[in-house]
Amino acid sequence: MKVFTGVIIFFILFFTLGWYTEVIITDQAEMILTELESLATYVKSADPETINNQLEVINQLWVKARNFWVLLIDHHDLDDFEVALARTKAFLDNNVPVLALSGIAELKQIIYRIPDQLRLNLENLF
């Protein structure tokens, strides 16, 4: 009976930790998505100072999230985001807003996909 109780406690702890991790990743992804939406709005309004400030906010959120995500997520997705972010920054530095908006859309898609891939459902199992 002691072994059964120990196994049950282990599984409860395991699933609780998994759920908590999913909640943290989803919350961080939503914050980054919100800031990316704001960046797209600022790019459309062509305000260089606000764009630079928003890029700094996104970069800070990304560094914070990456430090946690690197333990749990496929590195390919993280690298894709960093490459797309660097490309978008280059487009903004060179004053090419149309391509920058394309890069922002790519960043949003990458961030949107990450929590979805971690979610435990039948689609991810098979």
Image (tube, rainbow, N blue to C red):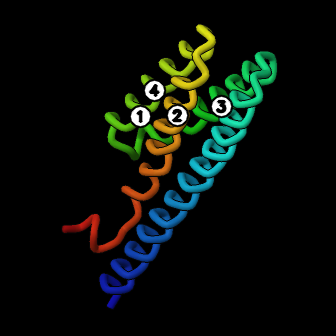
> How packed is label 4: few (under 14 Cα within 10 Å), some, or many (20 or more)?
some
Tell whether label 3 touches label 4 (CB within 8 Å).
no
Quarter of the figure with the C terminus? bottom left
- The residue beneath circle 2 is 67
Between discs 3 and 1, the one toward the N terminus: 3
- The residue beneath circle 4 is 84
Image location (x, y in percent) of residue 54: 73, 28
Between discs 2 and 1, the one toward the N terminus: 2
x 69%, y 33%: residue: 39
Tell whether label 1 touches label 3 (CB within 8 Å).
no
Image location (x, y in percent) of residue 22: 50, 60
Mark 4 vs mark 3: in front: 4
Q: In which quadrant of the rendered view does residue 116 lie?
A: bottom left
Between discs 3 and 2, the one toward the N terminus: 3
Circle 2: residue type: Asn
Quarter of the figure with the N terminus? bottom left
In the picture, measured across the screen, residue 15 lies left or right of residue 28, that is left
- The residue beneath circle 3 is 58
- Tell me the SS state at disc 1: helix
